[in-house]
Image (spheres, coloured by chain):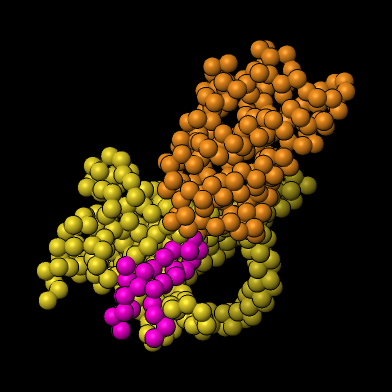
Amino acid sequence: MQQRTNHRKRQKDSGGGFRSLLLSGAGLTVLLIFLVVLFGSQEFGPVYKLLLDAAGPLQKVAAQVKAPFQAMKEQYLDLLTVREEKERLWQELQKCRTAAYANRGAVALNARLRKLLEFKESSGLPTVTARIVGKDPSLWFRSVIIDRGLGDGVDKGMPVVTGEGIVGQVYASSSNYAKVLLAIAPSSAIDVLLQDSRVRGILKGTGGSTFKLEYILKTVVVEKGDHVVTAGYGGLFPPGLPVGIVSEVTKNRRGMFLEIEVVPAVDFSTLENLLVIEQKKKEFKQQTETSTP
Amino acid sequence: MLMLTLIFIITGLLLAAAQTTVFMPNPLWPAAPDLYYILVAYAAYQFRLCQSIAILLPLSCVMDVYSGTVTGIYPAVCCCGFFLLRFMAIKMPVRKSLYQLPLAAVSYLFVSWLEVLLLELLIPEAGITWSWPPMLFRASLVYLFAFPLFRGFDFLYSSLNRGILPSRPGHTEAGNQFRQERRLP
């Protein structure tokens, strides 16, 4: 009995040794295969190719299934950030609109200043640039306050113009500010000429957006679209400055003169920057006299 | 009292500045409300004579500088409007809140008409002529702007007078509202 038990133990010991030998051999084989794969010729062998063909569709299906979920996830994440994004974009839009508005204003200002500069250079007259700071609110007196005064050389009686034509004349001035009586004021009267026919008349303000041209005889041919310029006779304005364009001519049965309406060359509703011509009445008069043959 | 007068003088000057800048976007703008006249009306209703003079004199002088070519026209307008409103307010048999604003607008129209008449007679070369549509429009603007400005002036007046004067002007008083109100000399 004792002998039988010992024999079985021996058999068991020899069987376990064989199995461990077999396992070690298999492990070494696998290790060898790995080593060959890793450090071998690095070629994608037929086995791999076969495996790839077999596993590829699986990956493809998995990727196709994943795609809508991925899209949903992205949409959800986008949705979470969309409010912030919207606010940011809205703010950006507001900034852009403000910038665009400022740019448009700057462009318009640039155009106006360019015209003033052109006039300044072409006229050859000494001028002071001024800005309107206040406007007369009354219906009967049309005047503006400008930010230049005696300290800048602006004195009573000096003509005020823009690049388009005449605006008015300095009515009163202090050391830093001056009051300009606009040419459209009912109390304003300017000596003018019809540019083509050289017929002289008196241009009066109406208090509105047009002038009245008076003392033009009925015998004179005046047509709509005729240009009116300063005569320079009174010595107040330099001669030849644009004043306006004839917009309506009425020939009444009674009276010697035509009734003529003139649209100002200057747009009084957009006045902002002006030029004050730094010459007194006397100087213009002398100029006119010397230029007249 | 001095502080009250001073604050209202400053308010008047600010109104004149606003009228000639903020409410006048361009020199031909027809819808500029005559804010200075609303203060004239308020002074006529609420202030003593000497206080009113102290408030309206600088205001009218500044308006003369800002506007017009005939000097002295605004002090004359302010003076006429002030005394006309003061007189009518004393003689009015109904309570203040009913007549204050319409009376201010009507007196504005009347004083403006008087101004044009005098200018036409005395300075015909100024070329000033009366026209009903714009003047009615201006009077309605005075009426419209008088409501918020009167509320503002009332607030200013009561804030500055809190603890000094027993009653708050501009508010309904107790008792018979149809009697003549006793005015300060």
Q: Based on the displayed image, in which of its 4 quarters is residue A67 positioned?
A: bottom right
Which quadrant: the N terminus of chain B?
A: top right
Specify the quadrant that holds the C terminus of chain B. top right
Q: Which chain is yellow?
A: A
Q: Quadrant of residue A270?
A: bottom left
Colour seen for chain B: orange
Asked if residue A283 shows in the view, the reply is: yes
The percent position of residue B16, horizontal first and vertical second, equals 51, 40
Q: Nearer the viewer, residue B47 or A269?
A: B47
* Residue A195 percent coordinates (x, y): 30, 80
The span picked out in magenta is A191-219
- At x 61%, y 37%, the residue is B81
Q: Residue A158: percent from the left, percent from the top? A: 27, 54
Residue A192 located within the stretch drawn in magenta: yes
Q: Is residue B99 above or below residue B124?
A: above
Check residue A74 for magenta coloring: no
Residue drawn at x 66%, y 64% as measured from the top left: A75
**A71 up-or-down from B75: above or below:** below
On the question of residue A270 being in view, the answer is no
